Image (cartoon, rainbow, N blue to C red):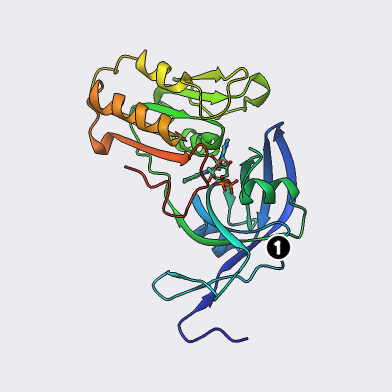
Amino acid sequence: MNAPAGLRPVDLLTVSAITTVTPAVRRVTLTAPGDVVAAAGPTLTLLVPRIGDRAPDWPQVARDGRIVWPQGSHGVSMRRYTAQRQDPTAGELDIDFVLHGDGPAAAWATAARPGDVLGVASAAPLGDAPAGWLLLVGDETALPAIGRILGAADPGTGGLVLAEVAGPEEEQPLPAPTGVEVRWLHRSGTEPGLSTLLVDAVAALERPAGEDVFAWVAAESATVRAVRADLRGRWGLRRTQHHAIGYWRRGRAMSPADGDAD
Ligand SMILES: Cc1cc2nc3c(=O)[nH]c(=O)nc-3n(C[C@H](O)[C@H](O)[C@H](O)COP(=O)(O)OP(=O)(O)OC[C@H]3O[C@@H](n4cnc5c(N)ncnc54)[C@H](O)[C@@H]3O)c2cc1C
């Protein structure tokens, strides 16, 4: 069927490879034309086909970028992810999916095979800003973004990464400049979203001297709210000096409107 006037098909990405990063993280390499890859990140709203449903009925995109859904059941869920690597020349991007068990995106990533297809609804920036001293706080879902922020940082940048993961087997190499310390915090059996490791670690930090400071925080929503309150209150960070965003909500599926930074 032809697209109605003013609507175009969504961009589709095809799985070309799968890599096990850690026991809980699966890297899916996706291919598309270079211009699609260039526009698809660093954070993407993915259109994820629901496993077990019939073939997805993809939405379309209006001229103003709005997603226009087909009538009735379409078999597609929207979830937000990060392009861990984005290479328009090769026409490739990598997404690291945390296999947390439940949910259409985790289920799709667990079952993904070369040739499978995902859609992209929109893309957005990571929300970071360059600074002489960076505080990066996050759990497994934030590691692709933290890696990109560190990879783009000036080599003279100082700072601290607080990364919460299940255990040592979930640690990943991060491209940190020499002045940035990476501190891994292990949940050691505590369920994701229930640990206070990140909140406690931030509460134990003194704000570095000077104004050239930026904090970036992404993890379970309640954790992010607590860390953000501490950084705004005790550290006195202005809105331009931090970006804090709930990447997932314990006990609740993400809706497309979730995950907006404050
Ligand atoms: C801007 C942005 C970038 C993101 N980038 C990434 C990324 O690169 N990699 C990545 O893995 N995630 C990333 N996330 C988080 C991801 O979107 C959520 O984890 C999302 O809920 C996964 O969708 P789902 O369909 O698997 O589960 P949902 O249907 O949303 O949720 C189903 C159930 O799973 C639980 N759940 C969801 N996520 C987790 C988790 N991580 N651990 C434990 N329980 C969970 C929920 O509480 C709910 O009970 C990002 C989120 C945002 C907002």
Whole-percent x, y for residue 207 in the image: 29, 18
- Can you see residue 196? yes
Whole-percent x, y for residue 11 in the image: 57, 67
Left or right placement of residue 45 versus residue 103 in this view? left
Please tell me how crowded label 1 is: few (under 14), some (14-19), or many (20+) other residues with Cα within 10 Å. few
Whole-percent x, y for residue 129 in the image: 35, 39
* Pick the front one: 101 or 134: 101
For ligand 1, tell me if the residue under mark 1 lies within 8 Å.
Answer: no
Whole-percent x, y for residue 120 in the image: 55, 61
Q: Quadrant of ligand 1?
A: top right
Within the image, what quadrant is residue 88 found in? bottom right
Q: Residue at x 42, y 69 (%)?
A: 65
Q: Is residue 91 above or below residue 109?
A: below
What residue is disc 1 on?
A: 53
Q: Is residue 96 above or below residue 225?
A: below
Left or right placement of residue 153 versus residue 14 in this view? left
**What type is the residue that disc 1 sits on?**
Asp
Q: Quadrant of the C terminus?
A: top left
Q: Residue at x 69, y 40 (%)?
A: 26
Left or right placement of residue 142 versus residue 154 in this view? right
- Can you see residue 41? no
Say which element carries label 1: loop
* Pick the front one: 170 or 93: 170
* Pick the front one: 124 or 189: 189
Q: Residue at x 46, y 55 (%)?
A: 256
